[in-house]
Amino acid sequence: DAGVIQSPRHEVTEMGQEVTLRCKPISGHDYLFWYRQTMMRGLELLIYFNNNVPIDDSGMPEDRFSAKMPNASFSTLKIQPSEPRDSAVYFCASSPTVGAIGQPQHFGDGTRLSIL
Amino acid sequence: AQKITQTQPGMFVQEKEAVTLDCTYDTSDQSYGLFWYKQPSSGEMIFLIYQGSYDEQNATEGRYSLNFQKARKSANLVISASQLGDSAMYFCAVTGFQKLVFGTGTRLLVSP
């Protein structure tokens, strides 16, 4: 079975540009999560969706960040305008509904974002 | 709110030896889950093992076992017979319902 698929794997762009990160969760998984990993702050949950509906976006750092999940097989995380401090690895993860507490989240390979 | 503490920033072990990575947690939830993930230098996050708060037996998955001490709120990961490929960052995480809270991680280096 295919795992969580993220694109692009690497993104380098200039400050002020719009950045769009994409994620395809594992088929049948009802929960989708976006994380950011930096050396300073570790792994932070930005937002998560259940059945395409945003449940908790309290981790989204600023209004420059937005996330959507238009259908069960696709989600985007957008940064507009981007800033150098947004440089990080962004992970998408998904998990199924049944036995929620016991189900691990399956992570994509991440997008390494560099804002110059 | 949940919190994970991993006090060992780095650990060294020789190949074929066992190693314990420490993890303590704090949660007000009655029912919760504890997870360990491995992040090799290539960057992906790999799920290793899970322990439920009501599980009476310690979880095991191959060479990985979780030493769960509920009263002490600890969930240490034990890797038996270390291999060179075990060199990586290891993250402990706790969840009440769906949201995972991660610790800062422990970097494990396995030497020949």
Image (cartoon, coloured by chain):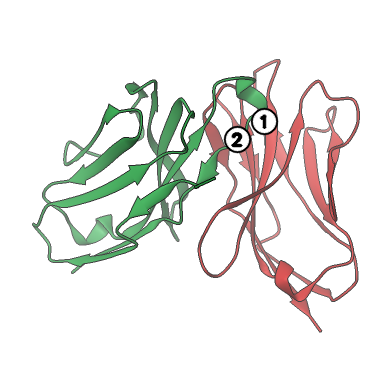
Chain colours: A green, B red
User: Badge 2 sits on which subunit?
Assistant: B
* Residue topped by disc 2: B3
For image coordinates 12% across by 52% down, the residue present is A18
Where does the C terminus of chain B fall, quadrant-wise?
A: bottom right
Dividing the picture into quarters, in which one does residue B19 lie?
A: bottom right
Q: Are marks 1 and 2 in contact (CB under 8 Å)?
A: yes
> What's the residue type where badge 1 is placed?
Asp
Marks 1 and 2 sit apart, C-alpha to C-alpha, by 5 Å
**Relative to residue B42, is residue B12 drawn left or right?**
right
- Earlier sequence position, callout 1 versus callout 2: 2
Kindly state the secondary structure of the residue where label 2 is placed.
strand
Q: Are marks 1 and 2 on the same chain?
A: yes
Residue A108 in view in this figure: yes
**Relative to residue B15, is residue B99 drawn left or right?**
left
**Relative to residue B106, is residue A37 drawn left or right?**
left
Q: Is residue B58 above or below residue B78?
A: above
User: Badge 1 sits on which subunit?
Assistant: B
Percent position of residue B91, x then y: 63, 51
Where does the N terminus of chain B fall, quadrant-wise?
A: top right
Residue furthest to the bottom in view is: B112
Residue A60 in view in this figure: no
User: Residue A106 — which label?
Assistant: none
Dividing the picture into quarters, in which one does residue A112 lie?
A: bottom left
User: Residue B26 — which label?
Assistant: 1
Percent position of residue B105, x then y: 62, 55
Q: Is residue A108 above or below residue A96?
A: below
Residue furthest to the front in view is: A1
For image coordinates 30% across by 37% down, the residue present is A75
> What's the residue type where badge 2 is placed?
Lys
For image coordinates 91% across by 31% down, the residue present is B57
**Relative to residue A67, is residue B57 drawn left or right?**
right
Percent position of residue A26, x then y: 47, 38
